[in-house]
Amino acid sequence: MRSILLLAFLANAKLGGAEIWQQDLSKDMRIGASTEGYDRVGLRCGVEKMTVEFKTTEDFSGVIYTQGNFYSREPSCFLDPVRGRSFTMSIPLHKCDTEKDGDKYSNVVVIQHDDELLTPGDAAFTLECDFSKPRDRTVTADLNGSKKSRSSRSTRSSIGLIDVDPGSDRKKRSAYVESYGDEVALVPRQGYSTDFGTREASGVLFH
């Protein structure tokens, strides 16, 4: 009888410990959106791909990948650098779980310091290339007085800092910057950068 009671007590204690551990994990292990560990994130929107550039504060040897492609590790969607501070990914607009809404393309890229686990200090960024803006028409006159028209589609590019947790709401951004051009860069604590040599960026928001 004593043996049966002891086993029942140990089973209850084990279950209770598991519940406590789960509660602690859910309350204390929130990862959030980090502004530490990187100096600059740049985005260039192209016809067939979006190119993202990262500059980290210190040597980085973790992994960088598009959200949803950690396990597939497809080369265009996953980067596993040996060590360094400057990295570039070229993400195809029709691969790597890139979402398409008309002429608007978006994806999420994760900077993860540990090769296997998400930990506090990791960061995730929404990348968006919007080609849906109306065409701007420019009329020019040549020496003969005839008129020629040239049309070009404007591009809006944007970067948002979000919670790295895959289940988080992408619309809740801790920082955001956009540019009415095909290139934009986000710099923590400075808001935005235009050192790509393109048009003015605007709309930065930090909480």
Image (tube, helix red, strand yellow):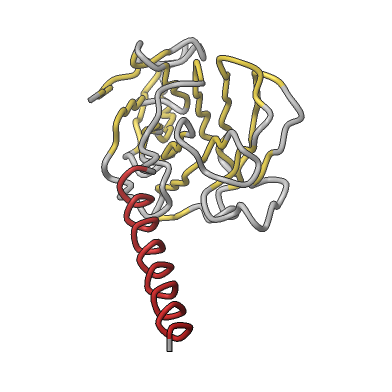
Left or right of 201, for residue 82:
right
Q: Quarter of the image for the N terminus: give it.
A: bottom left
**Residue at 47 percent of width and 44 percent of height:** 108
In the figure, residue 20 lies in which quadrant? bottom left
Q: Nearer the viewer, residue 177 or 112?
A: 112
**Residue at 65 percent of width and 24 percent of height:** 60
Number of marks in the rendered image: 0
- Whole-percent x, y for residue 76 in the image: 68, 45
Q: Is residue 65 above or below residue 44?
A: below
Left or right of 15, for residue 96:
right
In the figure, residue 30 lies in which quadrant? top left
**Residue at 64 percent of width and 35 percent of height:** 89
Residue that sits furthest to the bottom in the current view: 1
Q: Is residue 119 above or below residue 149?
A: below
**Residue at 41 percent of width and 40 percent of height:** 126
Residue that sits furthest to the front in the current view: 2
Q: Is residue 166 above or below residue 33?
A: below
Q: Nearer the viewer, residue 179 or 4?
A: 4
